[in-house]
Image (cartoon, rainbow, N blue to C red):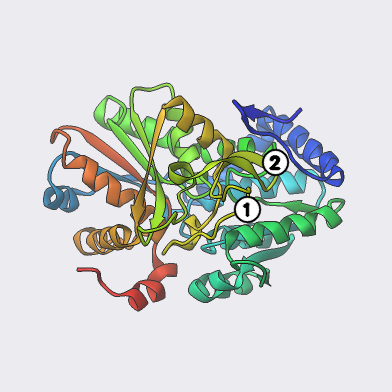
C-alpha cells in the first residue's frame, strides 16, 4: 500500500510501474532487517564515502555575525562533495540486491548525478543520468565528472530544461525498462516508497548531528537549519531530530525576490506531480509554474511529501531566501572560514546567520552544509560579488 503523510504522498503512477515500486519497497524493507546489508552500507559509507562528517564550529563567522554560535555539518566533505552519496550508495546496493545491472538518475545541480555515477562505477553498473540543458550549461564541471566516471549524460530539451523535466524523462525511461533498470531517484520526492527510503538513507546526517551535539555540548542544538529543494538533505537532517526540542528550519529558494522563485512550501498549494501529492508551484488550473533560482539543485516546482506534512503540523518552519542573500552568504563563508559552500546550502546559511543574531551567545545553531561550491564557481563569477 502507498504510504501517506497526512494527505500527502501516495503513488500516482502508470500500472506498469506498480510491480517495480512494490519490488523496491520489499527489497528496501528486507534490507533494513538484514545485518549484512547494513554492515556493508556502513562500511562503504565510512571507508569509501568518508563518514562520519565533522560538526565544525565556524568561530570567525560566528564572531563577525554576532549572536549564537554557528556550527556546520560538513556534508561537503563526503566523497563526491555532497550529501547525495548517502542515498545513491544505498539505492545502488538495493539495485544490486534486485539483480538490476543498469541504473538511471535525474540531476539538477549535478551532485546526485555524480554520486550515482560514482556508485555505478564502484559496483560495475551501467549508468545513465538525465539532466536539463540549462543545468548542463551552468554545471559543466559536474557533467565532465559524470562522463569521466563512465556515465552517459542525457540532455533534456523539453520545458524549462531543468530538474522537473529531468525527472520526467527518467520516469519515462524507467516505465519501459523496469525489468533490468533501477531508478535512483535523488530526492525525497516521487511515488512511494521513494520519499521514505531516501529519508532512511539520508537520516545518517541527523543521527550524526544528534550524537555529535550530545557528545560536544551535552544537549541537542537549539536551532537546526537545512536548505529545501526536493528536500533530501533537509529530511535527512530533520528526521532523527523530530522528537527532540531542537527548532527545525527549512530554507527554500526565493529566486530574484519578485516571483515564486522555487519556494513550493512558502508560495505553493497542494497538487500532484511526479507520482506524489504535495505542495506545488501551480496556477489556478493546476499547471506547473516556471521556477527560478541561482541554485540548480533547488530549482524545482515541488517538494517531498513529508515536508508538506511537517509544514502543516508546524513541527518544522519553512521560509525562503533570495538569490542575493544566498550569494552574500556564499561569499561571507568563503572569506571568513575558507570554505566554499554550494549555492544550495548558502540559502540555509543566510537564514541561519539572520536567526543567530537574535539568539543568545550561548545558543547553538547547526547548518547542514549539504555540498561544496566547486560546481558553482562559474555561475558565481558570472553574477559577481553582491557587495
Which of the 4 image quarters holds residue 365? Answer: top left
Residue 79 visible in this rendered orientation of the protein: no
Q: Is residue 140 left or right of residue 67?
A: right
Q: Residues within 10 Å of mark 1 (few under 14, many from 20)?
A: few
Q: Residue at x 39, y 60 (%)?
A: 343
Q: Secondary structure at mark 1?
A: loop
Q: Is residue 200 left or right of residue 176?
A: left
Query: In the displayed structure, would residue 103 be above or below residue 218?
Result: below
- Residue 250 coordinates in the image, percent (x, y): 40, 41
Question: Which of the labelled discs sits on residue 67, or is there none?
Answer: none
Distance between the alpha carbons at the discs numbered 1 and 2: 19 Å
- Residue 260 coordinates in the image, percent (x, y): 44, 54
The one nearer the camera, 142 or 93, is 142
Q: Pointers 1 and 2 in contact (CB under 8 A)?
A: no
- Residue 208 coordinates in the image, percent (x, y): 42, 36
Quadrant holding the N terminus: top right
Residue 293 visible in this rendered orientation of the protein: yes
Quadrant holding the C terminus: bottom left
Q: Nearer the viewer, mark 1 or mark 2?
A: 1
- Residue 100 coordinates in the image, percent (x, y): 81, 51
Q: Is residue 81 left or right of residue 286?
A: left
Q: Residue at x 65, y 50 (%)?
A: 185
Q: Residue at x 25, y 29 (%)?
A: 217
Q: Which residue is mark 1?
A: 287
The one nearer the camera, 23 or 94, is 23
Query: In the displayed structure, would residue 175 be above or below residue 13?
Result: below
Question: Which of the labelled discs sits on residue 191, or is there none?
Answer: 2
Residue at the outermost front position: 284
Q: Residue at x 70, y 57 (%)?
A: 168
Q: Secondary structure at mark 2?
A: loop
Query: In the displayed structure, would residue 131 be above or below residue 253?
Result: below
Which of the 4 image quarters holds residue 340? Answer: bottom left
Amino acid at each position: 500500500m502507498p504510504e501517506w503523510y497526512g494527505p500527502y504522498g501516495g503513488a500516482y503512477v502508470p500500472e506498469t510501474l506498480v510491480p517495480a515500486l512494490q519490488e523496491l519497497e520489499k527489497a528496501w524493507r528486507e534490507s533494513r532487517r538484514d545485518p549484512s546489508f547494513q554492515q556493508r552500507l556502513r562500511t562503504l559509507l565510512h571507508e569509501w564515502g568518508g563518514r562520519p562528517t565533522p560538526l565544525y564550529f565556524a568561530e570567525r563567522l560566528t564572531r563577525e555575525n554576532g549572536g549564537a554560535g554557528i556550527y556546520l555539518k560538513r556534508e561537503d566533505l563526503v566523497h563526491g562533495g555532497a550529501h547525495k552519496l548517502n542515498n545513491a550508495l544505498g539505492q545502488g546496493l538495493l539495485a544490486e540486491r534486485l539483480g538490476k545491472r543498469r541504473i538511471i538518475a535525474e540531476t539538477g545541480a549535478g551532485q546526485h548525478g555524480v554520486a550515482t555515477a560514482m556508485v555505478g562505477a564502484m559496483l560495475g553498473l551501467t549508468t545513465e543520468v538525465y539532466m536539463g540543458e540549462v543545468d548542463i550549461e551552468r554545471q559543466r564541471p559536474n557533467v565532465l565528472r559524470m562522463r569521466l566516471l563512465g556515465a552517459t549524460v542525457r540532455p533534456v530539451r523539453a520545458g524549462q530544461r531543468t530538474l522537473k523535466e529531468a525527472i520526467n524523462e527518467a520516469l519515462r525511461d524507467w516505465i519501459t525498462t523496469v525489468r533490468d533498470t533501477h531508478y535512483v531517484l535523488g530526492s525525497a520526492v516521487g511515488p512511494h516508497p521513494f520519499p521514505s527510503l531516501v529519508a532512511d538513507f539520508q537520516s545518517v546526517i541527523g543521527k550524526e548531528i544528534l550524537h555529535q551535539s550530545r557528545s560536544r555540548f551535552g544537549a541537542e542544538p537549539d536551532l537546526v537549519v537545512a536548505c529545501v529543494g526536493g528536500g533530501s538533505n533537509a529530511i535527512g537532517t530533520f528526521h532523527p531530530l523530530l522528537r527532540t526540542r531542537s527548532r527545525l528550519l527549512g530554507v527554500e529558494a526565493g529566486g530574484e525576490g519578485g516571483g515564486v522563485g522555487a519556494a513550493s512550501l512558502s508560495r505553493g498549494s497542494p497538487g500532484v506531480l511526479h507520482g506524489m501529492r504535495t505542495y506545488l508551484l501551480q496556477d489556478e488550473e493546476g499547471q506547473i509554474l516556471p521556477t527560478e533560482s541561482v541554485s540548480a539543485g533547488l530549482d524545482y516546482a515541488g517538494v517531498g511529501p513529508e515536508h508538506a506534512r511537517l509544514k502543516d503540523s508546524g513541527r518544522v518552519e519553512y521560509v525562503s531566501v533570495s538569490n542575493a542573500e544566498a550569494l552574500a552568504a556564499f561569499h561571507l563563508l568563503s572569506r571568513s572560514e575558507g570554505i566554499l559552500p554550494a549555492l544550495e546550502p548558502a540559502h540555509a546559511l543566510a537564514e541561519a546567520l539572520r536567526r543567530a543574531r537574535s539568539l543568545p551567545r550561548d545558543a547553538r545553531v547547526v547548518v547542514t552544509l549539504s555540498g561544496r561550491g566547486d560546481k558553482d564557481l562559474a555561475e558565481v563569477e558570472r553574477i559577481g560579488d553582491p557587495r
